[in-house]
């Protein structure tokens, strides 16, 4: 007989006659052990705005170690097998093995300047940390008659920051399921499936524009491309590479595009509600990752844009007098574009996450525990204890659970999903992961913003047209008969968590932009 489990598939033969015994057991799964460091080198050190500091207005730089996740980045952030390295020279190819880069290049990302704004990138400037891997560069912006040249003067700092943030986002999303088989971005996949040769090409201070950012997501096996711009909204200019929320938003386009419809299909989030949700996921993930235990509303792109309220119509908030968005909002003038549509979806997800936090609490770090030497992941205080190790690990806290359910929902939803499809996928993800423990919290959160069971759209078109009707009903199991037909204003309070945010994208490969 056969027994299929999460990570193994066994074929066993047993004796039905006395003496009863197991005759044989064969595991059809082939395990890829964690690769070991190919050669000794010191861990890199980066002078950066550390993870958790959104931008230069809220904290100072510090020296941070190459804190790679050993499961997501087994060889660290600077090592690539020579056969997978487009930067490898003739000497490297002859020697074989692995290349230990002393610049901002590695298995997950190639970060560099792109002042000319062209597609060529292999030979663009990358800062070197030297043999000691010390990426410690100057950042002291000054008012200048030539603000662009002034910003180019601290390019080594900018590229280092972009490399640091991009790698941490890679490692974080890996631990929530954006792995090789799911189509993540890596030059080498360690024999763990998926198409390789597609690390993120991260262009800092891209010369093709100002006051924006974008991400291009081709199918699995082709490099994703992130372009970050300078913002001429202040003097001196502000550098989008230094605002973590913008970088996270852009990288999240690669996540949602690869997970929705499968990694070989990059055309599932191109327009209408599906295209808008691509923007909304970026905003939500950037908000959730940057949020902390002391609740606040979050705007997107506020520092780079030099606007306190950011670049969205409203901050993301539990208080619907601060953010009045509902499903019907999509019918208003100005909400036909993907960025405006995305604001509504991100607000819904923000409320969903806060309801889960109210129930399960908040974890200060979204990074799960490091794996043990045998590759297993300890539960620690991050996951619920399991009595059945064949079951998936379930995050204990509301913000980590929300992140897990959103990513799992992306995998479950169909190509070109509607708001209804994505809502149902998240609820289904909870049913699979927790046996539906949070179904009513999810339904109440969505219904509170008009996406309840009786919401509808009349005359729907493939590009997102139609007339929407808010629905505030929830299933009877969640007290549906008692749910009012209209939303009740939620004034919020100082003891509850809030957050404000904003960002965007437009499509070409698909390419995703800030507005």
Image: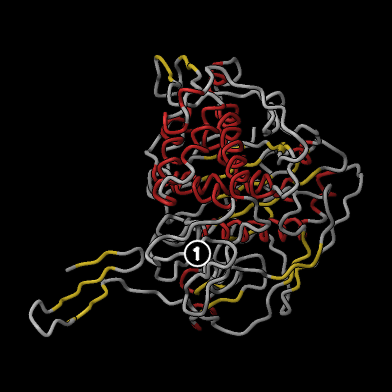
**41 left or right of 412?**
right
Residue at image coords 62%, 39% = 283
- Residue hosting label 1: 385
Residue 30 spot, x, y in % from top left? 32, 73
Q: Position of residue 412 (x, y in %)?
A: 39, 44
Q: In this view, does 325 lie to the left or right of 494?
A: left
Q: How many marks?
A: 1
Name the residue: 65% across, 48% down. 247
Say which of 318 and 177 sits in front: 318
Q: Please tell me whether residue 239 is drawn above or below residue 307 in the rendered image.
A: below
Indicate the position of residue 242 as horizontal and vertical percent values. Answer: 75, 50
Coordinates of residue 338 in the picture (x, y in percent): 55, 29
Q: In which quarter of the image is residue 99?
A: bottom right
Residue 136 as seen in the image, left or right of residue 101: right
Query: Eyeballing the image, is 264 above or below 495?
Result: below
Q: What element carries label 1?
A: loop
Q: Quadrant of the C terminus?
A: top right
Q: Can residue 453 be seen in this view?
A: yes
Q: Can residue 210 be seen in this view?
A: no
Q: Quadrant of residue 331 in the image?
A: top right
Residue at horizontal 67 percent and vertical 48 percent from the top: 116
Q: Residues within 10 Å of mark 1 (few under 14, many from 20)?
A: some
Q: Quadrant of the N terminus?
A: bottom left
């Amino acid at each position: 007989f056969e027994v299929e489990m999460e990570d193994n598939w066994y074929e066993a033969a047993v004796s039905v006659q006395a003496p009863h015994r197991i005759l044989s057991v064969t595991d059809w799964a082939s395990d890829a052990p964690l690769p070991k460091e190919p050669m000794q080198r010191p861990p890199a050190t980066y002078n950066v705005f550390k993870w958790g500091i959104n931008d230069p207005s809220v904290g100072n730089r510090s020296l941070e170690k190459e804190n790679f996740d050993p499961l997501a980045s087994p060889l660290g952030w600077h090592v690539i097998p020579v056969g997978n390295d487009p930067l490898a020279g003739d000497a490297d190819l002859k020697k074989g093995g692995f290349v230990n880069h002393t610049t901002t290049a590695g298995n997950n990302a190639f970060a560099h300047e792109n002042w000319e704004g062209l597609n060529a990138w292999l030979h663009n400037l990358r800062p070197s940390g030297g043999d000691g891997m010390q990426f410690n560069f100057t950042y002291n912006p000054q008012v200048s008659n030539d603000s662009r040249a002034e910003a180019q003067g601290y390019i080594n700092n900018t590229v280092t920051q972009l490399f640091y943030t991009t790698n941490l986002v890679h490692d974080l999303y890996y631990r929530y399921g954006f792995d090789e088989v799911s189509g993540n971005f890596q030059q080498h996949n360690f024999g763990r499936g998926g198409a390789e040769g597609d690390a993120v090409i991260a262009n800092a201070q891209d010369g093709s524009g100002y006051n924006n950012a974008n991400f291009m997501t081709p199918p699995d096996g082709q490099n994703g491309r992130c372009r970050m711009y300078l913002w001429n909204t202040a003097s001196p200019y502000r550098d989008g590479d230094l605002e973590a929320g913008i970088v996270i938003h852009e990288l999240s386009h690669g996540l949602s595009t690869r997970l929705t419809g499968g990694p070989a299909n990059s055309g599932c989030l191109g327009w209408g509600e599906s295209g808008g949700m691509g923007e909304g996921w970026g905003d939500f993930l950037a908000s959730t990752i940057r949020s902390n235990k002391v609740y606040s509303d979050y705007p997107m792109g506020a520092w780079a844009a030099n606007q306190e309220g950011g670049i969205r119509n409203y901050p993301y908030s539990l208080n619907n007098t601060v953010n009045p968005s509902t499903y019907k909002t999509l019918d208003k003038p100005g909400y036909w574009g993907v960025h405006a549509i995305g604001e509504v979806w991100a607000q819904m997800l923000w409320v969903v996450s806060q309801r889960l936090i109210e129930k399960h609490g908040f974890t200060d770090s979204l990074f799960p525990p490091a794996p043990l030497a045998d590759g297993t992941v300890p539960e620690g205080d991050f996951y619920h204890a399991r009595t059945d190790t064949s079951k998936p690990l379930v995050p204990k806290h509301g913000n980590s659970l929300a992140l897990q359910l959103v990513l799992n929902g992306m995998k479950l939803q169909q190509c070109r999903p509607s708001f209804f499809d994505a809502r149902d996928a998240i609820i289904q993800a909870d049913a699979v992961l927790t046996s539906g423990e949070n179904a009513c919290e999810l339904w109440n959160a969505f219904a509170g913003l008009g996406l309840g069971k009786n919401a509808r759209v009349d005359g729907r078109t493939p590009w997102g047209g139609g007339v929407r009707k808010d629905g505030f009903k929830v299933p009877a199991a969640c007290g549906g008969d008692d749910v009012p037909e209209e939303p009740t204003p939620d004034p919020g309070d100082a003891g509850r968590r809030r957050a404000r945010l904003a960002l965007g994208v437009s499509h070409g490969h698909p390419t995703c932009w800030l507005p």
